[in-house]
Image (cartoon, coloured by chain):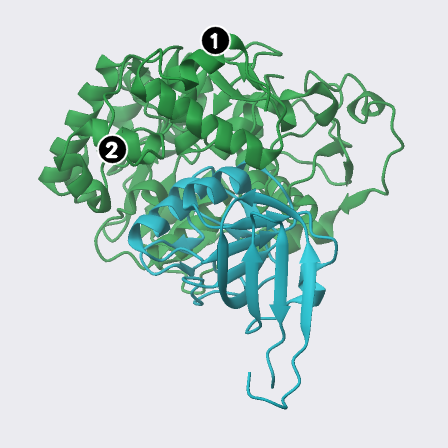
Chain colours: A green, B cyan
Amino acid sequence: MQLTDYEKQMLGGENGPAVARAMDLLVRYGEALGAERLVETRNVAGAFNASTPSIRSMAEDGFDRVYSELNLDSDDVVDIPHMAVPTCQLITGIDIENHALQGADPGLVDMQKDGERFFGQRGINMMCTCTPYQVGNVPVRGEHLAWMESSAVIYANSVLGARTNVEGKESTGAAGLTGRIPYWGLHLPENRLADRLIDVQVPVEDMAGWGVLGYFTGLQVEEAQPALNGISATPTLWELKHFGAAAASSGGVEIYHIPGVTPEAPTLEAAFGGNPMPDPIVFGERERVATWERLQSAEDRSVDFIMLGCPHNSIEQMSRVAELLEGRKVHADVALWVHTPRALAEVSKRSGYTDIIREAGGVVMSDTCPAISRRLPKGVRVIATDSAKQAHYLPAIAGVDGWFGSLEHCIDAAITGKWRGGP
Amino acid sequence: MPDGQSTSKIVMRGRGVVPGKARAEALVTRQTISGWGGINEREGSVIELRHELRGQSFAGKVLVFPGAKGSSGWSAYFHMCRLNGTAPAAMIFTRMTTKMALGAVVTRVPAITDLDGDPFEMIETGDLVEVDADEGIVTITKHET
């Protein structure tokens, strides 16, 4: 791989041992990819937090050791300096205010807080959400990023036209200290074109509908790059957020195009860069219903846990949840957790939404989600969620059965304790 | 191999992704694997609900698979498998992605891609596979049934 003089200097240790370890990892990683060089980035989103039992013994030696091992793949413990470029923390494992409700061990809560102080002192912005683009980190079109979080990567590439591959814990740890990431994959304009065509023949109307279409798309194209034809109404941020999260869960989609909606596809032809289009993959009523059914892993209609906010809810979604819950009571046998970024939780509180949700018997959570934290209310057997991503992951992670449906179905189940949703 | 018994060896060539050599039984799947949410890093096993390897362990095996899918936690989970001693002995894969490359690098096991034949046709679960990622050579000894 070709390195600039400055990159060679970093690799040689002139900027300190942590930066040298970071460059060493980037070179090993870049060579594994077959990348010819690195590219500069000034926008890194990674996972630095330490809040799981398996990291405890490492954290007892200090967070330099945690970062050295888990964020740099370094056998030596190196002192971690201030980040070289703007860097933010994605989702974490512990809600810093609702940790007792999560059932988190107080020792792990202290570890999380100590970690946040350490990372904050090194310039890592504690956004603590899977959706940095909802709370101020909104990349510019064409900007090179080093982002983790598959649902954020697909959003940044597709909806915003920024450029990032799906990075990992180690590569973002190295990028924050060097401002470099391998120039490969979606950083190159010619690799961003569509190569699959989804012909959407049914109206896609709400968040659940976009989640189903996303899940179908990921199953069909795996890690290919689809263009969606037949979208008649302009989708919202939260619908595209759900579409992308679902497509990145059932497959490995990192970029998609919607002609007339997403910035790199003014037309269907432009999405393919003038290349011949493949035969369309049809998404009709049959495919819609079959995908909906595939997302269900429960049979028992008595639900005990409703999970909303994966990816973390926008403020508009919080407003809608409050509107649906106003003056109603969550069933005594059901727990309702609604997840939104910490910054938006402030807006939710100030708007009165949090009070309405709390008076109904629900909880507004931030910083984490049950799939990441592996923490659910005690004794949960059957969950319901409005997120195709959570319906995909949580049953496997937590050993529960899951229903997937619309927000309205989920609120109905929260009130009645019974799942009455359907396609 | 005892004298007189026939052996059939197949040699394939590809590109070494992570250097090193390993020799172990193969575990083969034509399905991509999720890291975070798809494996149990303490046991080195696949947990994804509808995966054909669900419940099976890849610890100490030569894992032959198309590549990575799902969450960006892929590398972190295979990294933890290494720290827990539950990593595969080597990886042979067909589709390069950033998740796959970074995951192989931090798992620090020999890894090969771009083979000159279809590994899913050539390798079956239970075959003895030698991976020489320094030279980019895979040698398969078919499992006698």
Q: Write the residue at 25% across / 20% down.
A: A119
Q: Position of residue B78 (x, y in %)?
A: 41, 48
| C-alpha gap between disc 1 and disc 2 | 27 Å
Position of A44 compared to A417: left or right? right
Q: Is residue A408 at all visible to an observer of this figure?
A: no
Q: Write the residue at 19% across / 33% down.
A: A98
**Residue of label 2:** A66
Q: Chain of mark 2?
A: A
Q: Quadrant of the N terminus of chain B?
A: bottom right
Label 1: how many residues lie within 10 Å, few (<14), some (14-19) or many (20+)? few
Q: Chain of mark 1?
A: A
Classify residue B17 by image quadrant.
Answer: top right
* Mark 2: secondary structure: helix
Q: Quadrant of the C terminus of chain B?
A: bottom right
Q: Is residue B2 at all visible to an observer of this figure?
A: yes
Query: Which amino acid type is marked by label 1?
Result: Tyr
Q: Position of residue A34 (x, y in %)?
A: 62, 32
Query: Which amino acid type is marked by label 2?
Result: Val
Q: Write the residue at 71% across / 19% down.
A: A189
Is residue B131 depicted above or below A71 in this figure? below
* Mark 1: secondary structure: helix
Mark 1 vs 2, N-terminal side = 1
Q: Which mark is residue B51?
A: none
Label 2: how many residues lie within 10 Å, few (<14), some (14-19) or many (20+)? many
Same chain for labels 1 and 2? Say yes or no. yes
Q: Nearer the viewer, mark 1 or mark 2?
A: 1
Is residue A413 depicted above or below B51 in this figure? above
**Residue of label 1:** A6
Most distant residue in the front direction: B3
Most distant residue in the bottom direction: B4
Q: Position of residue B60 (x, y in %)?
A: 42, 63
Towards the viewer: A72 or A131: A72
